[in-house]
Image (cartoon, grey):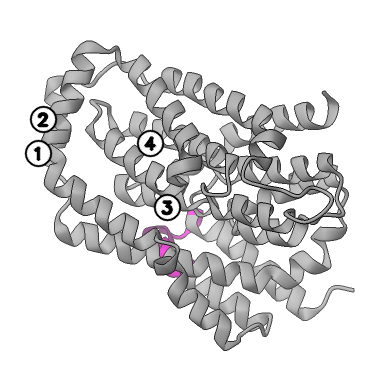
Amino acid sequence: MVSTVDMGLFGIFLLVLLCPFFIKKVEEQLEAFLFVMGVSAVTIANAWHMELVMEAIEEPIIKGIVPAVLVAGLIFYYGRSHAQRIMNVLLDKIPLKILVFFVVVILGLCASLITAIIAALVLVEVVSLLPLDRKTKINLTVVACFSIGLGAALTPVGEPLSTIAITKLQGPPYHAGFTFLIDTIGMYIIPGVLAFGILSTFVVGKKTTEKQMDDMVAKGGDTLRDVAMRGAKVYLFVMALLLLGSGFKIIIDTYLIHVPSMVLYWVNMSSAVLDNATLTAAEIGPSMHIDQIKAILMGLLVSGGMLIPGNIPNIICANKIGITSKEWARTGVPIGLVTMLVYFGWVFYI
């Protein structure tokens, strides 16, 4: 029977899903809104405890997320002119479409070693240096974030989802080690990263004109205040995801873990809003068949690119480039749905 707590949490989920698209103030202050929703979810679920509070405060720092954002921001702030010269040399020697393809593929595959966060930080700086109009930069960023989100799962280093998956499966019968994920879902992920690389060449058109480039340069780059504010927003966002995941754990434990894997694959599109690491921790266990594990992981990984809250790289890139929730969804949702359909057929029927 559905309880008042369940209904309250479902209401929170709908607010998180819909408000950024219909309320401009929420869209402009997405991190703060998600934090408030996270606090509300934990309160409704009566899940407050000191360990959670300390984890929420420490997690963004201990995991290196905020320090990475700040350090990378400072490096690119002081080295932007040098980076622009390097980009100009590359563009003189390499066609734009080919350069973009390699950026998307290399960052996607390397994310499993350098982490998805570092890959996203590099991506957003590269995109900001490319001679592209705003709409094209948005489309390219979304496609590249899908690639990074997929590729980061190849090793337990890449992102929290993969770390948790390995931890949950390190005992019998799987004895999961460092290469378990690349052995298990690498056959899906690597072609996916390559496919997103190819897709990126289609979303990138011609270079902008010199006048358009001059207009963009005239707007100026980041200030030190921008770098600090981005770090603060990412800190708040990571806290919000952790709180949302903790608040919704009761829903996940009560309903999702009993859902058949074919249905769960689609239900896991909720990771476009919720923390996919929390869903991984709740859904995956050593008693599952390997095909169920594959289905759960692929559903979570693909859907994470559909909306801004779905992945930390998304929020980093959206904040830097100034992508709104609507702008991200216009590109991310169609790509995500098509990719989900392709992988559904591949995972379950091939």
Cα separation, mark 4 vs mark 1, equals 19 Å
Residue type at the position of mark 1: Ala
Observer-nearest of 47 and 169: 169
Q: State how far apart marks 3 and 4 are (Cα).
A: 13 Å
Where residue 305 sits, quadrant-wise, is top right
Q: In front of the other: label 3 or label 1?
A: 3
Verify CB contact (< 8 Å) between mark 3 and mark 2. no
Does residue 29 appear in the picture of this structure? no
Query: Is 38 placed left or right of 107 in the picture?
Result: right
Q: Which residue is mark 3?
A: 315
User: Which quadrant of the rendered structure holds the C terminus?
Assistant: top right
Q: Is residue 99 visible?
A: yes
Q: Are marks 4 and 1 in contact (CB under 8 Å)?
A: no
Q: Is residue 298 above or below residue 104?
A: below
**As shown in the figure, which amino acid type bears the numbered disc 3?**
Ile
- Tell me, for residue 152, which label it has, or none: none
Question: Quadrant of the rendered structure where residue 110 is?
Answer: top left
